[in-house]
C-alpha cells in the first residue's frame, strides 16, 4: 500500500506547544488548500493543553497528517528539526500551529518552484491581530514585506534582490529538501528567533530563489500576549533577538553579500531598533540598555554607509549607542 507522502509534492511541518486554542484553525487552513498533494508532520512538543489530541484526531481522520510527540518539551527549533528528519517529499515548508495559510499558498509556492527549479520560493504575509470583539483581524502587507516579495521574481538571488533578506520567517517559504541537505541547514536548538540565521543562510547558499507577491500566511499575534514577538521587554528574549539579527547579518557578511548586509542593517536601524530603544528608556534593568547599546554600536560599525534614517530613528539609534 502506498503512503500519502508517496503521492505528495510537499511536506508541511507543523510544530505546536500549548496551542489548542488555535491548532484546529491552522489545520483547517491546510485542509482548505487549492492544491491537495501535500503531507503534514504534526510535532507536539509535550503540550499539556489538548494540542496532542487535536493533532491525533487530525491524523486519525486524514492520512496526509502524521503525528509525532516529544515526551519532554524541546522548543520550536527542535520540533522543526524533528519534522525535517521525517520528510519524504521533494519539497518542505512550515506552518506554526497558531498561524494560517491562505487557500492558494501551496499552489503558488509549489507551482512556482515546479516552473523554475529554484532552491526555494517565498511570499508575503500579514499580521493577524486581536480585535475588540474577541476575534482577530488581518492587517496590511508591511512595506518591508512588500519590498521583499513584490514584484514577482523568478530565479533571482540575494545579490540581485537584497531586499529579500527582510523576509526572515520560516513559514513564508517552500524549499527543496535537497537544498536543505546540500546547505547543511538546521534550526539552532535552545534559541528564540531561530528563523533569523536560517533564513539568511538560505539566501547566502541559494543558487536561485523565487518571490511571489501574494499574501500566503496570516501570522497570529496572540490576544493573551504569549507570542515570542510580544515578550521583547524580557532581557533573555532581547538577547536572543539581538543574537538572531546579528547572526543573520554575519551569514550574509561571511558569504560576501555586501548589498544584503547593507539592506539588513538599514532595516534593523529603521524598524527593529526604535521600539527596543523605547522599551530600554523605561526598563528597570540596566542590562537591557547595555545589551542594546553594544548591539547598536556593532550594527552601526558593520553597516558602513547605510541609507539615511528618518529623524526619529536616527535619534534613537544615536541614543542606544551611548548605553
Image: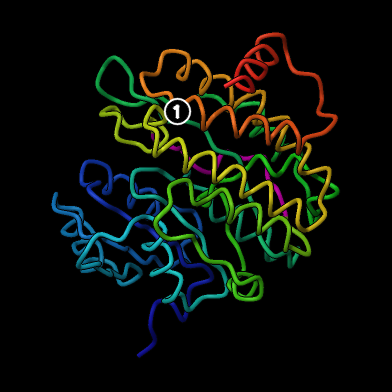
In the figure, 154 relative to 131: above or below? below
64 relative position to 133: left or right: right
Assign the C terminus to one quadrant of the image.
top right
Q: Residue at x 30, y 29 (%)?
A: 225
Tell which of 226 and 275 is nearer to you. Answer: 275
176 relative position to 266: left or right: left
Q: Is residue 181 magenta?
A: no
Tell which of 312 and 223 is nearer to you. Answer: 312
**Can you give x and y, in whole percent of width and height, for residue 279 in the image?**
45, 18
In the figure, 90 relative to 134: above or below? below
Q: Residue at x 43, y 52 (%)?
A: 191
Q: Answer with the quarter of the image where residue 12 lies.
A: bottom left
Q: Is residue 214 magenta?
A: yes
Identify the residue at the far top of this view. Answer: 311
**Can you give x and y, in whole percent of width and height, for residue 53 in the image?**
15, 59
Assign the N terminus to one quadrant of the image.
bottom left
**Can you give x and y, in whole percent of width and height, for residue 205 in the image?**
72, 63
9 relative position to 101: left or right: right
The residues colored magenta run 210-220
**Can you give x and y, in whole percent of width and height, for residue 158 in the image?**
78, 51
7 relative position to 190: left or right: right
Write down the residue under mark 1: 288
Q: Secondary structure at mark 1?
A: helix
**Colouring mode (rainbow / by chain / secondary structure / one colour):** rainbow
Near mark 1 (Cα within 10 A), the count class, few <14, some 14-19 or many ≥20, is: many
Tell which of 320 and 55 is nearer to you. Answer: 320
In this rendering, the count of numbered labels is: 1
Q: Answer with the quarter of the image where residue 245 lies.
A: top right
Q: Residue at x 78, y 64 (%)?
A: 207
Q: Main secondary structure of the magenta part?
A: strand
In the figure, 280 relative to 53: above or below? above
Amino acid at each position: 500500500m502506498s503512503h500519502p507522502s508517496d503521492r505528495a509534492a510537499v511536506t508541511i511541518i507543523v510544530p505546536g506547544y500549548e496551542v489548542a486554542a488555535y491548532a484546529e484553525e491552522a489545520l483547517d487552513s491546510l485542509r482548505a488548500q487549492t492544491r491537495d498533494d501535500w503531507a503534514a508532520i504534526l510535532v507536539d512538543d509535550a503540550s499539556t493543553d489538548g494540542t496532542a489530541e487535536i493533532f491525533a484526531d487530525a491524523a486519525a481522520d486524514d492520512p496526509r497528517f502524521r503525528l509525532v510527540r516529544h515526551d519532554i518539551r524541546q522548543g520550536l527549533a527542535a520540533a522543526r528539526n524533528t519534522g525535517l528528519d521525517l520528510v519524504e517529499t521533494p519539497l518542505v515548508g512550515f506552518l506554526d500551529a497558531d498561524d494560517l495559510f491562505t487557500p492558494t499558498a501551496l499552489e503558488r509556492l509549489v507551482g512556482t518552484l515546479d516552473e523554475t527549479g529554484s532552491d526555494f520560493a517565498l511570499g508575503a504575509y500579514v499580521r493577524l491581530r486581536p480585535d475588540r470583539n474577541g476575534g482577530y483581524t488581518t492587517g496590511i502587507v508591511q512595506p518591508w514585506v512588500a519590498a521583499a516579495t513584490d514584484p514577482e521574481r523568478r530565479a533571482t538571488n540575494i545579490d540581485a534582490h537584497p531586499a529579500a533578506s527582510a523576509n526572515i520567517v520560516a513559514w513564508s517559504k517552500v524549499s527543496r529538501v535537497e537544498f536543505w541537505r546540500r546547505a547543511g541547514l538546521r534550526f539552532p536548538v535552545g534559541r528564540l528567533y531561530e528563523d533569523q540565521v536560517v533564513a539568511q543562510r538560505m539566501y547566502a547558499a541559494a543558487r536561485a530563489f523565487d518571490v511571489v507577491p501574494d499574501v500566503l500566511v496570516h501570522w497570529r499575534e496572540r490576544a493573551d500576549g504569549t507570542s515570542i514577538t510580544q515578550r521583547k521587554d524580557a532581557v533573555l528574549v532581547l538577547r536572543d533577538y539581538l543574537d538572531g539579527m546579528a547572526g543573520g547579518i554575519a551569514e550574509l557578511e561571511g558569504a560576501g553579500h555586501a548589498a544584503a548586509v547593507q539592506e539588513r542593517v538599514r532595516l534593523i536601524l529603521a524598524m527593529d531598533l526604535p521600539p527596543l530603544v523605547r522599551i530600554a528608556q523605561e526598563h528597570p534593568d540596566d542590562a537591557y540598555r547595555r545589551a542594546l547599546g553594544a548591539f547598536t554600536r556593532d550594527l552601526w560599525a558593520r553597516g558602513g554607509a547605510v541609507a539615511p534614517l528618518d529623524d526619529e530613528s536616527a535619534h534613537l539609534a544615536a541614543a542606544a549607542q551611548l548605553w
